[in-house]
Image (tube, helix red, strand yellow):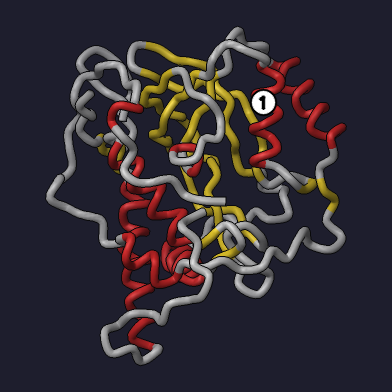
Amino acid sequence: MPLPRPARGCQPAGPGRSLAGHDPPLPPCAADLVVPPMSAPAAPDRSARMDLTEDLVARVERLEPDPGPMPGVVQFADADYAQTIADLMAQYRPERLHVFAYGSLLWKPEFEIESQTRAVAHGWHRAFCLRLTRWRGTREQPGLMMALDRGGCCNGVLYRLPAGDIEAQIDRLLRREMSSKPPANMPRWLDVEIDGGSQRALAFTANPKGNNYCGKLTHEDVARILARAAGHWGSGASYLYRTVAHLDALGIRDRNLWRLQQMVAAEIRALGEKQGSEDGVVPPVANQPPGR
């Protein structure tokens, strides 16, 4: 199935308008995409290629030892996950679970998907606003991950999961996204806009009261961190690259992320020059993983 052309910004749906371990291979196979036909949005310049490439990511890709949870931080227990599920189900009990994906769920959903379509979450934007001292960072070199933060709008993908045990499906998502208390990444029901209507979906949003929240970083700060940080799941550069590449393949061009990948690419090149490499390449690191 041919992919739709990329969308600019957040465009409301309506007549004649469209919505804009280890990493898997890129790009996703078009045969794996189930995207209902939509009217074509205005496309950005398709001659523009990502500055951040797999080769550049490989220069900084590495696995760091897992330092484990931060001392003194209370971890989620089974009872905490069960209570969170009960609270969510008390707010809304869907017949089928829908999930709004905007970051790593695009390229590593870790659950079966029945169908997917583009969607917009109004009132939220994707941002690197959660500090990581594990996963894709360390205590010595913290990294960043994305969450939905307040304001603006976010073009993403709406997944519909197969019929089944909804509470078990939510439990798997919670254990993927939440580990410590208070959680920095909070599950929330959002009414996302799709072509011709809306759908309530589960999404993960930044908790400003969480220990790891670090909103309002500048693009320069984020680029410096992503170009340098890595953990036992791989590098921040890989996380950014996979997200931007998958969004672009799905017809979604996030202007902030597009600018950020350009800045991270420049940072990685500058790191190579600073280390005195003749060809501007950061020396390879042992035990490089294939991705996340």
Q: Nearer the viewer, residue 279 or 250?
A: 279
Q: How many marks?
A: 1
Say whether residue 164 is left or right of residue 13: right
Residue found 58% across the figure and 25% down from its top:
202
Q: Compared with residue 146, is residue 152 higher up or lower down, i.e. above or below?
A: above
Asked if residue 17 is positioned above or below residue 15 in the image, the reply reads below
Q: Residues within 10 Å of mark 1 (few under 14, many from 20)?
A: many
Q: Residue furthest front?
A: 287
Residue drawn at 82 percent across, 27 percent down = 83
Is 111 located above or below residue 281 in the figure?
above
Q: Amino acid at mark 1?
A: Ile
Q: Could you say whether the residue bearing mark 1 is in a helix, strand or loop? A: helix
Seen as rendered, the residue at the extreme top is: 95
Label 1: which residue?
170
> Looking at this view, is 250 or 28 the one in front?
28
Q: Quadrant of residue 206?
A: top right
Q: Could you say where residue 244 lies in the image, as x and y percent from the top left?
A: 36, 48
**Residue 81 placed where, x, y %?**
79, 32
Could you tell whether 64 is left or right of 66 in the image?
left
Q: Residue at x 62, y 57 (%)?
A: 135
Residue 182 location (% of width, % of height): 78, 46
In the picture, the quarter occupied by the N terminus is top left
Q: Residue at x 55, y 35 (%)?
A: 110
| Residue 188 percent location from the top left of the image | 63, 29
Foreground residue among 95 and 201: 95
Please identify the quarter of the rendering in which residue 252 is found.
top left
